[in-house]
Image: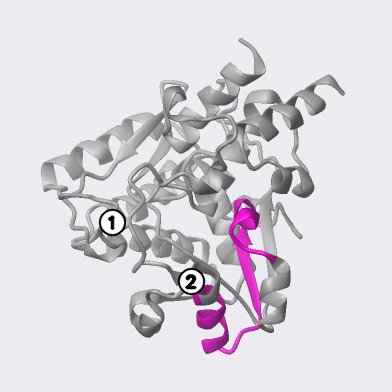
């Protein structure tokens, strides 16, 4: 499973949005069900799934699927 | 004096309680729209070594309704079923006997709306842990601010309570900017839980489950230590 597939699985799990409902460049904040608590759960799930710890700056930077992939790949490869 | 404002959630995970414990006053944001795919009426517990959802059924839940307008569709039989699922799952957990009565009372509560019902589960857990934060409901505290822009409303409620420090979940940076809060005389902080791990029977650890799971496997004293495992920026 590549980073994007795993990320979509986490989005589906934490934000309850199926993979076909997610667009790469759409901001998470624009999802109709977005709230900060739900997003925090998403961040926690992401850290668990990829075995990474995200910094505050990285969380701020992570606004969409595209940016999340860049950040996760950078973390996983370091 | 520090404040936080957050939608009520059903037996939420420990990060929610860290936020409550970090502030002096906590406002249940109960007069905002219900989030259909959110955590207002459901959470995850450990069933047979895996995470599984427990959900409070609702009457005609819709994103067009406010949290304090949505009634439960949760009869006695369904409450008993949920409770027996929790009992079966956790009966061998080390702190089962200490906490099951509190959970049972909260599940059997006769609150009519999900706003009241979910916030009651939070207050019950805080009472058990002896967390002294004061609780309020936005619908009662500040109904006149309904309809304001999201950030403006949080600032308004914070200032109305005489506070100048507001704590939000870390996911809120996209919605709320520190500069904007500062220009309105409120300091904005973001809280992010640090990684928390404890023994869950002998299976591999599953993090970020409901507070129910945390309380079943940890003493009150241990939970109080976990409540301080966060980063505030």
Q: Mark 1 belongs to which subunit? A: B
Q: Is residue B150 magenta?
A: no
Depth order, front residue of A27/B117: A27
Where's residue B43, x and y in %?
40, 41
Q: Residue sitting at 59 percent across and 25 percent down?
A: A7
Where's residue B12, x and y in %?
45, 50
Where's residue B175, x and y in %?
58, 58
Disc 2 target residue: B149
Disc 1 target residue: B105
Depth order, front residue of B35/B162: B35
Depth order, front residue of B228/A58: A58
- Answer left or right for A70 relative to A7: right
Say what secondary structure mark 2 lies in: loop
Say what secondary structure mark 1 lies in: helix
The span picked out in magenta is B153-177
Quadrant of the snapshot with the N terminus of chain A? top right
């Amino acid at each position: 499973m590549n980073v994007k597939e795993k990320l979509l699985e986490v989005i589906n799990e934490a934000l309850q949005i199926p993979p076909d409902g997610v667009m790469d460049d759409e901001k998470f904040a624009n999802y109709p069900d977005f709230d900060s608590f739900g997003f925090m759960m998403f961040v926690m799930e992401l850290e668990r799934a990829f075995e990474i710890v995200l910094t505050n700056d990285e969380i701020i930077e992570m606004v969409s699927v595209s940016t999340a992939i860049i950040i996760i790949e950078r973390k996983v490869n370091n | 004096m520090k404040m936080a404002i957050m939608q009520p959630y059903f037996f939420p995970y420990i990060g929610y309680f860290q936020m409550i414990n970090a502030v002096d006053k906590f406002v249940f944001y109960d007069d905002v729209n219900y989030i259909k795919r959110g955590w207002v009426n459901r959470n995850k517990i450990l069933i047979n070594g895996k995470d599984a959802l427990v959900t409070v059924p609702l009457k005609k839940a819709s994103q067009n309704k406010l949290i304090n307008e949505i009634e439960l569709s949760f009869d006695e039989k369904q409450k008993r079923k949920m409770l027996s699922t929790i009992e079966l799952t956790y009966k061998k957990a080390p702190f089962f006997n200490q906490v099951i009565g509190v959970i049972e009372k909260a599940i059997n509560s006769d609150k009519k709306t999900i706003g009241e019902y979910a916030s009651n589960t939070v207050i019950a857990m805080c009472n058990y842990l002896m967390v002294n934060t004061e609780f309020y409901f936005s619908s009662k505290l500040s109904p006149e601010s309904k309809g304001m822009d999201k950030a403006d409303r949080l600032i308004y409620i914070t200032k109305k309570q005489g506070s100048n420090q507001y704590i939000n979940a870390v996911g809120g940076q996209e919605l709320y900017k520190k500069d904007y809060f500062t220009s309105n005389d409120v300091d904005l902080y973001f809280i992010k839980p640090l990684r928390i791990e404890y023994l869950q029977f002998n299976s591999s650890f599953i993090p970020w489950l409901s507070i129910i799971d945390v309380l079943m496997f940890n003493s009150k004293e241990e939970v109080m230590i976990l409540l301080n495992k966060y980063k505030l920026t």
